[in-house]
Structures are given as structure tokens and as C-alpha cells.
Amino acid sequence: MNKLLCWVCCFLCLNVFAQTVTLKDVKGKSFPLNEKSGGKARVYYFLSPECPLCQSYSLTIRNLYGEFAKQNIEMIGIIPGTDFSTTAITEYKTKYKIPVQLLRDEQLLLVSKYKATITPEVVVINNQGKVMYQGRIDNWAYELGKKRKVITEHNLRDALAAIVNNQPVKIKLTKAVGCYIE
């Protein structure tokens, strides 16, 4: 009986994770996201319009987008929860010139799936849906309120470069620093 129960639970879990998650943009347009990227990889940026680090990383996000979007890397900004109005999200996107589509994860579906806890935090999945990298964008912020003058580790960029060049991602997990997702 226990083996049968285990098989049923495994089947249900696999089906839940194989389903497409549909999120909406600020205009209410639906975006179905399956767990496999449509390109070489997909980057989920977990962002908060009020988080000072999310604001400060806007130039880095633009630069990474400029470098990797043309190399078949999808990039999507995820705004967790329901705390931010359409106006707040739109103003954040406009003011900080965020080049990626921003989608609301009101039910925290992707937050739960990837166990994201911080903004900004990134998750990179390959075209098979496997997490290739998760954590910080780089090591500029090493603690809340503490930043390096010189960035010495470009974790997200290195992971994307490895994927584009069909190389293994050397560092798969780092600790993100920023605002907690509530």
C-alpha cells in the first residue's frame, strides 16, 4: 500500500511541475510560462520596485539583456506578491529603464517553485527546465547596506556565458542579498 501511495504522490508532483504557470503583466495580459525555456535558457529576475538593490541593479540588468537577449536567452522580471500597484510597477520599469517584461507572481507560484527568498534574486533554467544557476547577480552587494567598490564575481553573467558557449556552469548556487520576499 505504501509503494502505491508513493507512486501516486510522485505522479501528482510531476504533473503539477510539468504544468504551465500563467502570470500576468501590469495590463492584465496573460503570459503562459512552461518550465522549459524557449531559447537556450531563461532568466527569472525576482524584483521589487521598492528594493534599493533592485533599483541599483537596473543598469546591470540592461547590460546583461543587451549582451544575452540576442544570443537566445530569455529574460523575465518577476514581481512577487500583490503589494505593488500597476502604477508602481510601471513607474519602476520606466524610471529604471528595465528592458525585460515584468510579470506579477501574485500567488507566489514561481517563488515557491524555485524557493526564491530575496529581491534581486535570479534563477536560470535551461531549455530542459533544469535550474542551471540561482542566487545573486554578482558580488557587488555582500551584505545589506555593504557594497564592494569593485565587483570581482559576475555570477549571472558567467553562468549565461557558459550556457551560450555550451560549457558547464561552474557555480550553480550563491546567496542573494537584498530585500526579503514576503
Image: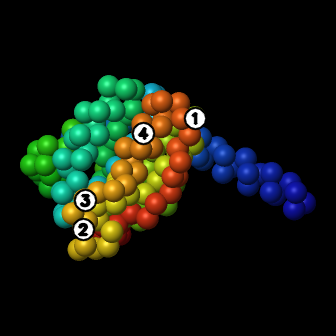
Q: Nearer the viewer, mark 1 or mark 2?
A: 2
Q: Are marks 1 and 2 in contact (CB under 8 Å)?
A: no
The CA distance from mark 1 to mark 4 is 15 Å
Q: Position of residue 50 (x, y in %)?
A: 19, 63
Q: Nearer the viewer, mark 2 or mark 3?
A: 3
| Mark positioned earlier in the residue sequence (3 or 1) | 1
| Mark positioned earlier in the residue sequence (1 or 2) | 1
Q: Which mark is residue 160?
A: 4
Which residue is label 1 attached to?
A: 128
Residue 21 in view in this figure? no
Image quadrant where one finds the N terminus = bottom right
Which residue is label 2 attached to?
A: 147
The CA distance from mark 2 to mark 3 is 9 Å
Identity of the residue drawn at 43% across and 57% down: 135
The CA distance from mark 4 to mark 3 is 21 Å
Q: Nearer the viewer, residue 40 or 154?
A: 154
Residue type marked 4: Leu
Does 63 sit left or right of 2 as displayed?
A: left
| Mark positioned earlier in the residue sequence (4 or 3) | 3
Q: Nearer the viewer, residue 169 or 69?
A: 169
Q: Nearer the viewer, mark 1 or mark 4?
A: 4
Q: Nearer the viewer, mark 3 or mark 1?
A: 3
* SS assignment at label 1: loop
Circle 1: is it few (<14), some (14-19), or many (20+) Cα within 10 Å?
A: few
The CA distance from mark 1 to mark 2 is 35 Å
Q: Position of residue 96 (x, y in %)?
A: 13, 49
Circle 4: is it few (<14), some (14-19), or many (20+) Cα within 10 Å?
A: many
Q: Nearer the viewer, residue 58 or 140?
A: 140
Does 115 sit left or right of 102 as displayed?
A: right
